[in-house]
Amino acid sequence: MSKKTNYSYIGIAFIILVFGIIFIPKIIDRVSSGDVIRNESRSDFANDKTATSDLAFIEINNEPKKVPAFSFINQNGDIITNKDYLGKVYVIEFFFTTCPTICPRMNANLIQIQNSFKGFENFGVASFTINPDYDTPEVLKKYADQYGVTNPNWHLMTGDKDAIYKLSNEGFNLYTAEEDQAAGGFEHSGNFALIDKNGFIRSRKDQFGNPIIYYRGIASEAEKVDEDGAPEEISALKEDIKKLLNE
């Protein structure tokens, strides 16, 4: 091997040594402090669970609408408040156990949604009866067992009638009313509301960029459309639950 070749290897080794002395400690320091992981790893960015999804916030007077405070008793006799749902994504419905029309279909859809999210400890359902005089915790427990409610975060709640109706009609604008002429003696919306982990009402947008606000809860995925020909929204609701669980 020539002297010229030896000098070349010596020069390369010297450059590598200088690079190591100057830059490697800085790289180690940045990795230790987390800068490389937070700012430069594309794979970690792709798996980031803190990013906000494309679901809209429902705004009232330019303020995101939150779930109003509530406190009721569930099917197990426990007091449940809105704070019990913080950190969870959940669906809200208003129903009553003796409903002969839309409630059985709504709750069959919710059972299907429940079963789609088994194992997700931060998913739940909040069901408020609009017939609390009849729907005691014991009645609600029997109803829950009948339908197959297994999610520990699915609370079927009863309590003061005025408070429930105020929560429905004013808190969510989901219509409920006593009506002697209606089947079962009550009228109510067949829509579901979707709530994020921080208690905000969320929804996807329509083709014009406006929030749909609520999800139609009567028609099932299998039925495809409801009686009026409107497409089912259970599949959309499931997709959007996934988005909020990943926020």
Image (cartoon, rainbow, N blue to C red):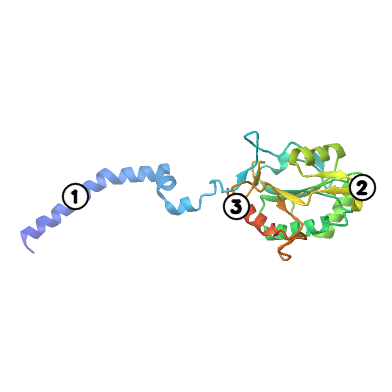
Q: Position of residue 125 (x, y in %)?
A: 74, 50
| Front residue of this view, candidates 28 and 73 | 73
Q: Amino acid at mark 3?
A: Gln
Q: Residue at x 84, y 59 (%)?
A: 146
Q: Quadrant of residue 10?
A: bottom left
Farthest-out residue, right: 180
Q: Residue furthest left?
A: 3
Q: Nearer the viewer, mark 3 or mark 1?
A: 3
- Residue ranking furthest to the bottom: 222
Task: From this view, report whether residue 88 is shown above or below residue 5.
Answer: above
Q: Position of residue 112 (x, y in %)?
A: 73, 61
- Of labels 1 and 2, earlier in sequence is 1
* Residue displayed at 26% across by 43% down: 22
Secondary element under disc 3, as helix, strand or loop, is: loop
Mark 1–mark 2 contact, CB under 8 Å? no
**Can the viewer see residue 153 in this picture?**
no
Residue kind at label 2, given as amino acid type:
Tyr
Q: Is residue 161 visible?
A: yes
Question: What amino acid is at disc 1?
Answer: Ile
**Quadrant of residue 149 in the image?**
bottom right
Which residue position holds label 2? Answer: 134
Q: Which callout, 2 or 3, points at the residue further toward the start of the chain?
A: 2
Q: Which residue is mark 1?
A: 15
* Crowdedness near tag 3: few (<14), some (14–19) or many (≥20) residues, C-alpha within 10 Å: few
